[in-house]
Amino acid sequence: MILSAGYSYKIPPWQGGSIQYAINIHPSLLPEGAGPMPLPLVIIKGLKRTGVTLHELSPDWDAGNIILQESFALYGRENIDELLCRSQDIAVRLLKKFLEAPELHWSNSSPQIHKEGHYWQKPTPDELDVDFSKDIQTVDRHLRALRIVKSNGDVEVISGVASWKQDHQLKPGTVIFRTKKTCTIAVEDGVVLFHARIKQASLNRVDSQEINNPKLSTCSDKPV
């Protein structure tokens, strides 16, 4: 049997030999969310429900018959680590179920019905960049969807995202307050706060280009 999960290379045709089963575990409710990086996009798109699919390996990416599938509801505040943990838990459960009766589940698989938009391309670095000039919902989702954010050589681990609507006269992207553990930034229609652990660069560095550019991925400036 061939089993793949998070494998980024195309597996060659396997049928006709001694291998009976070839399956892939994918962290979305296929056919929606086919593609190499669905978990961050589940959060960014604001889906109400997602899940895990166990499907047959096929010549096309994430296109094989669905063998087993399980969904779960999203409450709207998940971060990428929580989503990954819940997906991994379901993946183990589905695999155990398949191994209990592989021939039965294999024979009962069903073809996918693909529609336009079901395949999600891998986001570019710019698409994953946090643009603090956007509205609070967009910024909040992007921060929760990212584990590590990069900008100008800095690497920052993001967690504990909170946001609220608030009237202010600040330019979006303005760092309102910065401590060693948290950062508060003005966005278009409110404020976001998040925990940030910088792995490179100095907390005391002030970069005027970053301050004037609302499309940031770090919070390494001094409070204003």
Image (cartoon, helix red, strand yellow):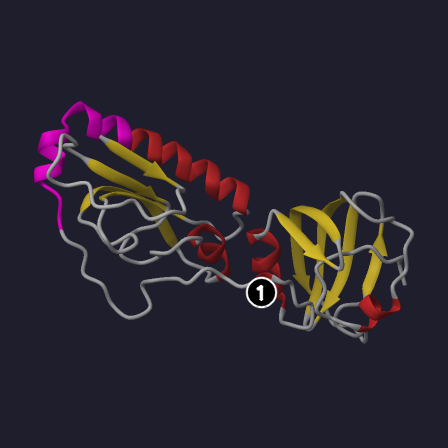
Q: Residue at x 22, y 37 (%)?
A: 22
102 part of magenta stretch: yes
Amino acid identity at mark 1: Gln
Q: Is residue 170 left or right of residue 164?
A: right
Residue tagged by mark 1? 137
Using a 10 Å C-alpha cutoff, classify the residue at mark 1 as few (fewer than 14 neighbours), some (14 to 19) or many (20 or more).
some
Question: For the stretch drawn in magenta, what is the main secondary structure?
Answer: helix
Is 168 situated above or below 124? below
Between 175 and 22, which is closer to the camera in this rendering? 22
Q: Residue at x 39, y 42 (%)?
A: 7
Start and end of the magenta stretch?
95-110
Between 62 and 93, which is closer to the camera in this rendering? 62
Give the percent coordinates (x, y) of residue 132: 69, 67
183 part of magenta stretch: no
Is 61 situated above or below 115? above
Q: Could you say whether the residue bearing mark 1 is in a helix, strand or loop? A: helix
Give the percent coordinates (x, y) of residue 25: 32, 40
Q: Is residue 130 left or right of residue 224?
A: left
The C terminus: image quadrant:
bottom right
Give the percent coordinates (x, y) of residue 106: 13, 37
